[in-house]
Structures are given as C-alpha cells and as structure tokens.
Amino acid sequence: MNTTTTYTVVPSPVGELVLTAEGGSVTRVGFAARTSIDPAWRRDDADPALAGAKDQLGEYFAGDRRDFDLPLAPAGTPFQRQVWEALAAIPYGDVTSYAALAERLGRPGSARAVGAANGANPLAVVVPCHRVVGADGTLTGYAGGLPAKRRLLALEGHRFSTGTGSMPSLAGVSNPNTWA
C-alpha cells in the first residue's frame, strides 16, 4: 500500500512548524528550520488531520489547551514509542528529568537512551519533549533550540531564575521528577 504524506506549514510563537499526516493521522510536528520537505510529500492545508493539529496548536499557544487530542502515528522503534508515550503522560506545567523518565519506564540507568529517544521525537510540542530537563533542573537540548524550549515552559507557567536564565524554577511543582 502506497500512502501519500501530506503536509502544511504553520506559524507559531516558537517558529514555523511543519506538520505531516498519513492515512488520517499526524506523523510529524517539526521545526521548519530543521525539517526538510520531501519532494514526494503533497501540500494540503485542508487535510483534516493537519487542520485539526493546526487548530489545537493554535489553542495551545493561546493558552486555551493543555492536552492534545489528535490521531498520531509517529514512526519509531518500540523503545522510542515507549518513551514518547511516557512523554505524552507528563502533565502540562510539570517537568521531569531523563533519569526519572528512565525509572518510570522501568529502565533505571538508561537516561542517555531515553534522552536519545526524546531527541528523536517527531511530534514536537504535541508530545511534550520540552518538559524534560536535566537532573539539576537546567534546560537541556531541544530540536527547536533552548529559546523555544524556554518559551514553551514559560507558556506552561514556569518561571526562570535570574542570572543565566537557563534554569526553570520548580516552585509550585511538588516533585518535578515524578508522574502524576
């Protein structure tokens, strides 16, 4: 079966996003600066899956949505998909560390593997890999860049310390390294 990949490009406060869909499910939400448009993809701004994603992303960036309710079909290994499902369970406004996420998955000591799977997340913002920080609370790599990660966390209510501006204040978060 040959499935057509449709795509659209949408503006956002963290830069343009490229959205792709196949068979009625969203397969990618990527930063345009880091996402190559495959010539085989067909632009379709009216694709229902893409239109739904665009609407929900708009609501999220406006502060009117905390959770996404979209048909998703990211391509990845079973381990990557397990990590992405765990990322999707991180509540809005909360953060966790790579080590805590590894423990949550029953794989203590695999923080680096979890970090690699997190970095391969094809559904930026929707699957909230931006909610994973270093064990000491510092912001760590993000496909959209640290300013985008900082902005997404600020949108979700995180305040940042003065000085380097790289460390989110976890005040008000009972235990940022556990799951709700």
Image (cartoon, helix red, strand yellow):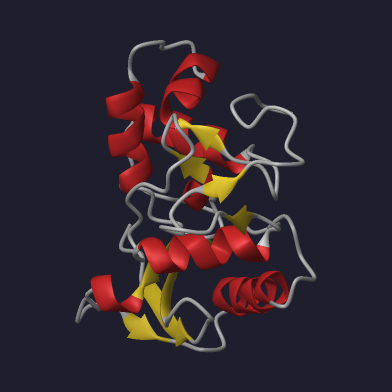
Q: Residue at x 70, y 49 (%)?
A: 92
In this rendering, does residue 35 appear at all? no
Percent of width and height locating residue 166: 43, 54
- In the image, taking residue 149 as reference, residue 109 lies left or right, namely left
Q: Quadrant of residue 22?
A: bottom left
Extreme-front residue of the structure: 163
Q: Is residue 32 above or below residue 46?
A: above
Left or right of 31? Residue 154 is right
Query: In the rendered image of this protein, does residue 84 appear above or below residue 121?
Result: above
Quarter occupied by residue 31: bottom left
Camera-side residue of 108 and 75: 108
Q: How many marks?
A: 0
Q: Nearer the viewer, residue 55 or 2?
A: 55
Q: Which residue lies at the image location 43% right of the left edge and 22% below the top edge?
A: 99
The residue depicted at 65 percent of the width and 59 percent of the height is 70
Q: Position of residue 103 (x, y in %)?
A: 49, 15
Quadrant location, the C terminus: top right
**Above or below: residue 4 compared with residue 126:** below
Location of residue 135 in the rendering, given as x and y in whole percent from the top left corner:
44, 29
Residue 69 percent location from the top left of the image: 71, 57
Quadrant of the image containing the N terminus: bottom left
Does the image show residue 141?
A: yes
Give the residue at x 25% y 78%: 37
Foreground of the two, 51 or 175: 175
Q: Is residue 130 above or below residue 60?
A: above
Is 7 or 68 nearer to us in this picture?
68
